[in-house]
Image (cartoon, rainbow, N blue to C red):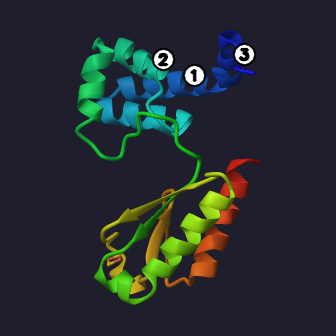
Amino acid sequence: MARQTSEVESVDAPKYAALSRDIEECKREPGTTLDMLHAVQRHFGYLEPQAVGMVAEALGLTKAQLYGVATFYTMFFFEPKPPVIARVCVNLSCHLRGAQEILHTLEEAAKEQHDAFEVEEVMCLGLCEQAPALLVNEEAVGQVSAEEALEKVQASVAGSSS
Ligand code: FES
């Protein structure tokens, strides 16, 4: 059964409150539009429309203007994502050191776990000397086997649901 609007609002109330504090903090400095959008994504996992509306109001802009800014960047999400995203480098150094096995292992596990996490292929993370490398959310992980990469992702998934 779908949640009622008031139920959703009460579940998300702490996130809106935290965002409100972040917006107030950012408003003290000029040029913090991206910081505010990052705050929305940090609290909601994507650019949640009502939260973007709060930023728009604080900046005296429209939501359309803010989405116009956000679409310029690849790091913003416009739909909900799982709390954990594994970005596996498939560029040459990592490819030669087992990136495809890591990618395959993580993709299979994500399917088995009904998309508890998301797997993305990326080009060079700047961690070539630690190949094969991946990012688990913001954390860089290098010189790992496929099994170790999966353990790292599983730990992050477990941490995000506790
Ligand atoms: S080639 Fe994988 S981090 Fe550079």
Closer mark to the observer between disc 1 and disc 3? 3
Q: Does the residue labelled 1 lie within 8 Å of ligand 1?
A: no
Instruction: Report the disc number at residue 84.
Output: none
* Comes first in the chain, label 2 or label 1: 1
Which secondary structure lies at badge 1? helix
Where 71 sits versus 148, above or below?
Answer: above
The label on residue 50 is 2
Camera-nearest label, 2 or 1: 2
Question: Which residue occupies the foreground of this view, 65 or 34?
Answer: 65
Q: Which of marks 3 and 2 is nearer the N terminus?
A: 3
- Residue, x 35% and y 64% (percent of image)? 122
Give the CA separation, mark 1 to mark 3.
Answer: 14 Å
Q: Are marks 2 and 1 in contact (CB under 8 Å)?
A: yes
Q: Mark 3 points at which residue?
A: 7
Q: Is residue 122 above or below residue 23?
A: below
Residue sitting at 39 percent across and 29 percent down?
26
Q: Where is residue 38 in the image (x, y as percent from the top left)?
A: 41, 38
